[in-house]
Image: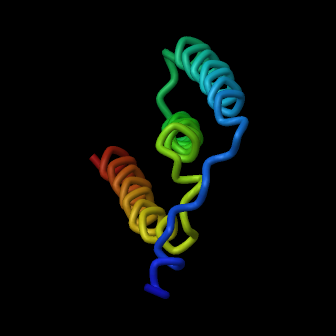
Amino acid sequence: MEHSEHLEHTETPSNMKQQIWKTFWILFALTIVDIGLYFMLLSTHSMLKNFLFIALGIVKAFYIVAVFMHMKFERKWLVNFIVYPMLFVVFLVILMLIEGDFTGLVR
């Protein structure tokens, strides 16, 4: 049973309730900023606006996955196993936005 030591989960911190509330308020503030930017930029259509909202979404997703889904407290290899494929998905979305913008300009 010497392998069982390597398979144990890491412990969550004792101040988990405090971290959850801190994350809640960070997400709340980011959502208010997101909504405010949406209404301020309602009439503009640009790639910068798309990248801005994608970046805010990624930041909010990071906080949700890290604290609420406890990925912050998992082993590094597991976190990398989940994060690296998502980076490829984000890269694909960015490429699709660039291609869509180019196609819109050509037509």
Left or right of 36 in this view: 94: left
Residue pictured at 68% horizontal, 45% vertical: 13
Residue pictured at 65% horizontal, 28% vertical: 17
> Is residue 77 shown above or below 52?
below
Left or right of 18 in this view: 83: left
Residues 45 and 49: in front is 49
The image quadrant that residue 76 belongs to is bottom right
Residues 65 and 12: in front is 12
**In this figure, which colouring scheme has been used for the structure?**
rainbow
Residue pictured at 51% horizontal, 23% vertical: 44
Residues 60 and 107: in front is 60
Left or right of 98 in this view: 61: right
> Is residue 50 shown above or below 90?
above
> Is residue 27 shown above or below 40?
below
Residue farthest to the left, as pictured: 107
Residue farthest to the bottom, as pictured: 2
Residue pictured at 67% horizontal, 21% vertical: 25
How many numbered discs?
A: 0
Image x and y of residue 90, in percent: 43, 56
Image x and y of residue 89, in percent: 37, 60
Residue farthest to the front, as pictured: 1
Image x and y of residue 56, in percent: 57, 36
Image x and y of residue 1, in percent: 43, 85
